[in-house]
Structure formats: C-alpha cells, structure tokens
Image (cartoon, rainbow, N blue to C red):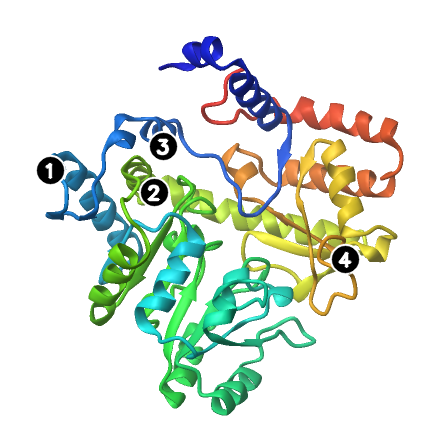
Amino acid sequence: MDMTSIKSYDPVIYDAIKHEEKRQREGIELIPSENYVSVAVLEALGSVLTNKYSEGYPGKRYYGGCENIDVVESQAIERVKQLFGCDHANVQPLSGAPANIAVYFGILEPGDTILGMDLSHGGHLTHGHPVTHMAKIFNFVRYHTNAAGEIDLNDLEAMAMQHKPKLILVGYSAYSRDIDYINIKKIADKVGAMTMADVAHIAGLIAAGEMNNPVPYFDIITSTTHKTLRGPRGGLILCKQPFAKKIDKSVFPGFQGGPHENNIAAKAIAFKEALEPAYKDYARQIKANAKIFEEEFNKLGYRLMFGGTDNHLLLIDVTTHGITGKEAQIALDKAGITCNMNMIPNDPRPPLDPSGIRIGTPAMTTRGLKEPEMRQIVAWMNAAMKNHGNDQKLAEIKSEVTEMALKFPVPGAKA
C-alpha cells in the first residue's frame, strides 16, 4: 500500500501525514530529542519486516522463517558494538524508558536503592521521579547540580556513602554538560555499586568522539536511537559481558515479547550511517551550532542553566525577560519555531507552566543549517518572545522562518 492508496482509503490519516510533512518542511525544529531520519531509515520502517514475528534472539527464535530477520538483527548488533566499542548489545528495546526498566529488573531486586539525577536538574522521568511506576518498586535517591550548574561529585560521593545504592545512574534529558564517568565509577567502586549511564540524548555525540564515552568504565549503558543518533524511534542496551545474559533475559522474555524487526532494520541503517566519516562532521557541527546559541542568548541577557553547553542543547530561564516557559513555547510555535517548555533547577513554577525552555541543534543541523542561520534563529526567537501577545508580529516572523526553512529540505518529506 503506497501513499496514493492511503489517500484513497483513509483520507483523514493521509491529510494528517501531509500536514505534518508541511509543518516539518516550513518550520524550525529545536526540540533536542527530535531529529530527521534518512530516506533509507524511512524505507526500512515501512518494509515487509513489520509482518514478521521473531520472539527470541538471532539463532534462538521461537518462530520459523526467521533466517532473514537474523541477518538484520545480527547486523544491528555488530554495528552498534563497533560504534561504541562495547562487549555486548541488545537492540530490541522499544524505546529509552523500556530499556531503562529492563535494566532495573535485570540487575536489581525490588526495594534496592538507585542513586540518580533529579528531573528538575536535568535528569529523566525514568531516573526515579515519584510519578513513575519504577519509583514505587525501587528506592530512588536523587542528586542535584550545584550553584555553578555542575554535578557536584563531592555531594554525589557523600550521598553514595550515606545511602549505599546498588546502582549509580547518570544521564539526563536537559543537562547541558559532559559527565566525568571515570570519577563517578571510582565513587561507585567505593560503595560496591553497579554503574549505568543513560546516554539517550548524547549517544550520537559519544559515537562520533565528541563527548566522553562511558563504555570503557560503566557496567551498562542505555540509549534511544532517535535523538543525536538520527535513527528510528527505539532503544538499545550496551553492557559488559558479565551482564549480557541478565540483560537479554530481562528484555525478553522478562519485559517484552516480539521485537519490531522493521525498526531494528532501521536501527542497523542508522548505525551504519553513524560509522561514516561524514557523521563526525555532523556531530561537530551540532556542538558548534549549540555554542552559537549559547553565545547569542548570553548577549541578549538570558540566564542559561548550567552556565552554557558542552553538547547539543541549552536550558534557558526565560522569566528574566518577562515571559514563562509555556508562554514562550506557545509564542514560538506561532512563529514557526518548535521547542519545549521545561523546568529549571529548583524551579518555583509548576511543571505545566515552568520557567524555562529547552532547545537543541540536532534536527536543524541535519538539514544543513550552520552558524549564520543559528544567529538568525536566536534573533527570531527573541523577537517572538518579546512579542508573545502580538499575533500579527508572530505571523510576520513565521513568514520569514518559513522562507529560510524551505531552503533546507527535510529528508524524505514531500511537498
């Protein structure tokens, strides 16, 4: 069934897809967790592999007819092992949260203590936020950043000594600095804790050698495949060999059933793309573009959380300019610029109307934007936030945004 048949059979869904293609083509995408996949990845996602059930692992399936599926999944495993230099890889997790949950159940017992990063200081929901189911099963203790915007290793060590966690977890969804894996590993060794790094946001930058790699030091690494890795929406788990059997058994049959092999094929393609020399150039440009954002927002007097960025994102307190994070997100949407409202450390405002916005550069770097375009985007953002109650002005900005965006095509999107 091609797009023409979708159009004739289900015009409601067809129209939604076409409108989304238009929105992506004409807008500026700054959500740090979003990216654009290649045409090859899109083709794999829409392939006949979606028809096949393949519970188990390559060479050990519970269904017949998996000989081609085994080739696909084995390629994905070998490519991601090469990409990160790891002992073992599981490419079946459906996304980042299921990957994290599979790890918890694979190596811990209910009630065990996990030391992880607080959500409001840049961590992730699955790192122990009270609203999650995992917080009812495991005892999460959450560390914070200090006044300088850094992970305070002295404080982390003191908390580890006090709480004696079974697992020390690092990684983030809104933290803009690199992580000192070596010294955190030393802290873990002092208290006999296992180590886990959730690198969902920065996996692509790590793979390209642009950020510290936890693989040589940490026991287990989890990630998504759809952020800086620029692959399909999915997850993965990397680990040292002693954890391999526990991890695989926890993913299947412990937590998931049949893997989505069309998605795994798309992961394999994305891993191959990340092994190409051009990908290193891409990762370097992501960081260069983020540094332009840092420079320009600093000039305009915005307060940047954590003092700036070492990676692909910035967390910005916009209340210093008389606007809330929610108001900023709405205004920027009207101007054709997509970001997300986000809590800042020790935010006095509620989660659904926080003080900050979170922006990132992976998606627009994929489309070819560089430093000059980044400076222009900041100018548009500042104008939009200053005029957040003026729909006419926001429409004028959107017209300029669309003119520039159309010069940088979205892979696979059709006019």
Classify residue 301 by image quadrant. Answer: bottom right
**Residue 355, disc:** 4
Whether residue 57 appears in this view of the structure is yes
Q: Which residue is mark 3?
A: 41
- Residue type at the position of mark 2: Pro
Q: Which residue is mark 2?
A: 277
Query: In front: mark 2 or mark 4?
Result: 4
- Residue type at the position of mark 1: Gly
Whether residue 209 appears in this view of the structure is no
Q: Secondary structure at mark 3?
A: helix
Q: Secondary structure at mark 2?
A: helix
Dot 3 crowding, Cα within 10 Å, few <14, some 14–19, many 20+: many
| Total numbered labels | 4
Q: Which residue is mark 1?
A: 64
Query: In front: mark 1 or mark 3?
Result: 1
Q: Between marks 1 and 3, how big is the CA–CA gap?
A: 26 Å
- Of the two numbered discs 2 and 4 on the same chain, state the one appearing first in sequence: 2
Residue 184 in the image: state x and y as whole percent. Answer: 44, 78
Query: In front: mark 1 or mark 2?
Result: 1
Residue 150 in the image: state x and y as whole percent. Answer: 60, 73
Left or right of 375 in this view: 252: left
Dot 2 crowding, Cα within 10 Å, few <14, some 14–19, many 20+: few
Residue 88 in the image: state x and y as whole percent. Answer: 23, 60
Compared with 368, 80 (above or below) is below
